Amino acid sequence: MFGQRERMRMLAALPVLSLLLASAVAGEKPTAEGGKKDEPGTHVEMPFLIAPMSVDGKLEGYAYISSKLTTSTPTASVEVREKLAFIQDAFVRDVNAAPIGLSGDPTKVDTKLLGQRLVADARRIVGASKVVTITFKQIQFSPLHPKAQTDVPPPEKAPAAEAKAEPAKTP
């Protein structure tokens, strides 16, 4: 029925077909939440968010936050990008309306609470089914008044030390 060449071709094509099948099945793995794995084009990079950090009503510094929204479909990503200015405005209003710091350490951001609030803001603007989650890529706290370094002498002592230095002697 099949000649020697045809059998060899079929055997050579078998590993390639099995790899293609395995990659297709792997692409449909469910995530821990029960949905499909993130599709390409479902992430929207958000502009930096600068949030005030207060302790007992006193401003201590700012948290610089970079994040990305994950949407349910690539089409939803397009809608989020179209409304990006409105979402960013809602984010800024949210972080200025209520504290985002941890109760034990107000210089650290409560990412769980902040994530819930920001996702709710985005869903309110573009639709509840279109925004899945938010991921914080980087959060950096910058104090309003950095502490002075202790190993550097104060400026008024440095010139006095130079005045006491003896001039170099020439032979």
Image: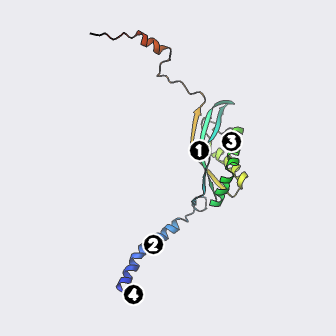
- The residue wearing badge 3 is 92
User: In what quadrant of the picture does the C terminus appear?
Assistant: top left
Q: In the image, is residue 62 above or below residue 23?
A: above
| Residue beneath disc 1 | 66
Check disc 4: other Cα within 10 Å, few if <14, some if 14-19, many if 20+.
few
Q: Residue at x 59, y 58 (%)?
A: 41
Residue 56 seen from this side: no
Total numbered labels placed on residues in the image: 4
Residue 3 rendering spot, x and y as whole percentages: 37, 87
Q: Are marks 4 and 3 in contact (CB under 8 Å)?
A: no
Give whichever of 1, 170 is nearer the camera: 170
Between the residue at mark 2 and the residue at mark 1, the CA separation in whole angstroms equals 41 Å
Q: Is residue 90 above or below residue 159?
A: below
- Which residue matches tag 2? 18
Q: Amino acid at mark 1?
A: Ser
The residue carrying mark 4 is 2
| Residue at the spot 70% in from the left edge and 44% down from the top edge | 89
Q: Is residue 123 left or right of residue 148?
A: right
| Identity of the residue drawn at 53% across and 65% down | 27
Disc 2 residue type?
Ser
First of labels 2, 4 by sequence position: 4
Q: 14 or 99, which is in the foreground?
A: 14
User: Which of the two marks, 2 or 1, is nearer to us in this view?
Assistant: 1
Q: Residues within 10 Å of mark 3 (few under 14, many from 20)?
A: some
